[in-house]
Image (spheres, grey):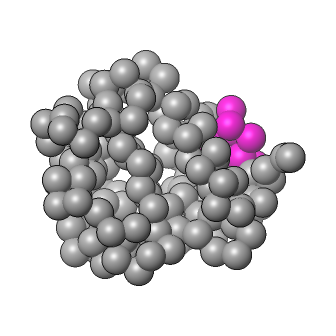
């Protein structure tokens, strides 16, 4: 999926305030651009109401985004973020529902994601049917030094 420059700006604006620098999870603009140029990656943008963001909406109005990569029969959620002031308003729920629906339309039978242990979004993922399937011990390194486990989650898509 080749993104519009404004959409990259929207993704980066959300990522800049949604991802805590302590955990080093945010991607650079170049990483996002490169992923989207490959063609197997897709993105979703949500407005303040959680609905798809209109193309003509100002850059600063994006409240959330999802970035994923398609593989045969599965899709992996690579990045997912909602701006702090818009959390707990259903935006993450709407984005995850759209992600699952669009992944299914692309032929996915299962969804994957990986998150650091202790990520507050775990309850959201579990509500959407994701279950843990593995752990990578000490995978993430924080800026302050401690290492954190990565947990891989899977969701099987029903018919």
Nearer the observer, 117 or 87? 87
Nearer the observer, 116 or 38? 38
Compared to 24, does 82 lie above or below?
A: above
- Magenta includes 3? no
For image coordinates 63% across by 47% down, the residue present is: 100
Q: Quadrant of the N terminus?
A: bottom left
Compared to 91, does 64 lie above or below?
A: below
Nearer the observer, 1 or 27? 1
As drawn, the residue found furthest toward the right would be: 159
For image coordinates 43% across by 19% down, the residue present is: 89
Q: Magenta segment, which residues?
A: 125-131
Count of all numbered marks drawn on residues in the image:
0
Nearer the observer, 104 or 13? 104
Report which quarter residue 113 is drawn in: bottom right
Compared to 137, does 57 lie above or below?
A: above
Report which quarter residue 145 is drawn in: bottom left
Instruction: Give x and y (percent) for residue 69.
Output: 53, 68
Side (left or right) of 121 relative to 137:
left
For image coordinates 78% across by 60% down, the residue present is: 109
Instruction: Give x and y (percent) for residue 111.
Output: 68, 57
Side (left or right) of 115 relative to 26:
right
For image coordinates 15% across by 42% down, the residue present is: 59
């Amino acid at each position: 999926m080749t993104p519009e420059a404004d959409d990259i700006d929207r993704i980066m604006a959300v990522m800049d305030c949604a991802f805590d620098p302590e955990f080093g999870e945010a991607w650079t603009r170049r990483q996002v651009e490169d992923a989207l140029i490959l063609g197997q990656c897709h993105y979703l943008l949500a407005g303040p109401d959680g609905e798809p963001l209109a193309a003509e909406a100002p850059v600063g109005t994006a409240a959330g985004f999802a970035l994923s990569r398609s593989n045969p029969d599965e899709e992996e959620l690579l990045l997912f973020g909602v701006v702090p002031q818009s959390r707990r308003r259903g935006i993450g729920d709407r984005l995850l529902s759209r992600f699952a629906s669009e992944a299914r339309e692309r032929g996915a039978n299962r969804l994957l994601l990986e998150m650091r242990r202790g990520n507050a979004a775990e309850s959201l993922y579990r509500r959407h049917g994701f279950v843990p399937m593995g752990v990578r011990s000490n995978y993430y390194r924080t800026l302050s030094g401690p290492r954190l486990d990565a947990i891989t989650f899977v969701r099987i898509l029903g018919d």
